[in-house]
Structures are given as structure tokens and as C-alpha cells.
Image: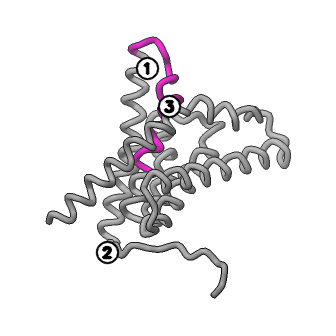
Amino acid sequence: MTNTMILKTMEKPRLSVKVQTMATIAAIAGAVAVPQIFHVLGAAFGLGTGLGESFLPMHLPILLVGLLAGPYAGAAAGMFGPLVSFALSGMPGVAMLPFMMLELCIYGLAAGLLRNVKLPVVVKVLLAQTAGRIVRAAAILVAVYGFGSESIPLASIWLSIAAGIYGIVLQWALLPAIVHCVERMKNEE
């Protein structure tokens, strides 16, 4: 017997291309709409974009679509969600756009790859968050040290984690509950 770790998987039905496409479009719409709600509330309370930076609302639909629809839908929504949001609202800012596109693409991809792995959903979310943050940090390091970019401060790696801690915890609380409800509704059909 070998000492290799084998991840147990659950049998979940394969989703059609049409369902994955619709899920991707819905997640992109969510990645545009949900942050706008937070920004409007932030403006109403005099916080500007602070609520969005704290609660990471764009991450929710991307992680969710990965967990529910798989890696293709998650990666595509993660890549195009910030781009569509930028095109429609100018947010995220142009300096952070490529990093957010990459980070959210990895979130969706990782969550999707973990979709059928038999782990608690909160662990899947934590692993996807970790993968996304590592890739974002690596991209920022490459931009700063490899290309000499001065538009992104190196401290933004740690500051984004500290500023977004409420959003990270919100994702741990909300996403398992939503996935559970969706899976229960599918089982009742």
C-alpha cells in the first residue's frame, strides 16, 4: 500500500454546456451587481468603496459558480466578471484589474476543481481563497520586481487580506449555506 493521499470524490451529475454557460452569465451579472449594492451602501454611509473592499462582494458569485457549476464556469466568470464590471462601472480600478481578473479566475477554477471532492464546503472555500491569494501575490511580485511597476504597492498583498477579512469570513458563512440549500433543492426535484 502506498502512502499517497487519495481525495475522495462525490458523484455529482455533469452539467450540460448550456447550464454551465447560463451559470457563468449569472455569476458575471452577480459579480457586477452585488459590488454595486455595496458601493451604493458605502456611499450612503460615507464610507466610499470601503464596504466593497471589506466584504469582497465580487468574490461571492465567482466562488459560488465554481462550487455549483464546475471549473470552466468558475474560471470564465472569474476572468470576465471584473472585466465586465470595469467596462460598466470603472471598478475595479485599472491598476488592480488584471490582478483581480487573475485572482478571481483562480478562485472560480479552484472552487470548481474541488466541486466533487468530498470535503466540507467551508474547506473548499478556504482552499480556493488560498489559491487565489497566492496567485494574486505572485502576480503582484512579478509586476513589482519583474517589470518594475510602481502603480501597485507591494504592501497591497497584505493590506488586501487585512481589509477583506470580513468578506473572507462572510464567504465562509454564506457559501456553505447557499450550496447546501441549492443541493437540497436539487435532491427534492
Please, what is the three-letter code of the amino acid marked with disc 3? Tyr
Q: CA distance from mark 2 to mark 1?
A: 40 Å
Q: Position of residue 47 (x, y in %)?
A: 49, 16
Q: Which residue is at a point 46% across and 59% down the rendered structure image?
A: 74
Q: CA distance from mark 2 to mark 3?
A: 33 Å
Side of 97 relative to 52 (left or right):
right
- Name the residue tied to disc 2: 13
- Name the residue tied to disc 1: 42
Q: Is residue 144 above or below residue 49?
A: below
Please, what is the three-letter code of the amino acid marked with disc 2? Pro
Q: Residues within 10 Å of mark 3 (few under 14, many from 20)?
A: some
> Would residue 156 be counted in the magenta stretch?
no
Q: Which residue is at a point 67% across and 52% down the rendered structure image?
A: 135
Q: Position of residue 134 (x, y in %)?
A: 67, 50
Q: Position of residue 41 (x, y in %)?
A: 38, 21
Q: Nearer the viewer, mark 3 or mark 1?
A: 3
Q: Which mark is on residue 166?
A: 3
Residue at far top of view: 46
Q: Nearer the viewer, mark 2 or mark 1?
A: 2
Question: From the image, which quarter does the C terminus lie in?
Answer: bottom left
Q: Nearer the viewer, residue 31 or 95?
A: 31
Residue at far front of view: 1
Q: Earlier in the sequence, mark 3 or mark 1?
A: 1
Disc 3 and disc 1 in contact, CB within 8 angstroms: no
Q: Residues within 10 Å of mark 1 (few under 14, many from 20)?
A: some
Disc 2 and disc 3 in contact, CB within 8 angstroms: no
> Would residue 47 be counted in the magenta stretch?
yes
Please, what is the three-letter code of the amino acid marked with disc 1? Gly
Q: Nearer the viewer, residue 163 or 77?
A: 163
Q: Position of residue 140 (x, y in %)?
A: 73, 44
Q: Which residue is at a point 43% across and 25% down the rendered structure image?
A: 39
Q: Which residues are magenta?
A: 44-62
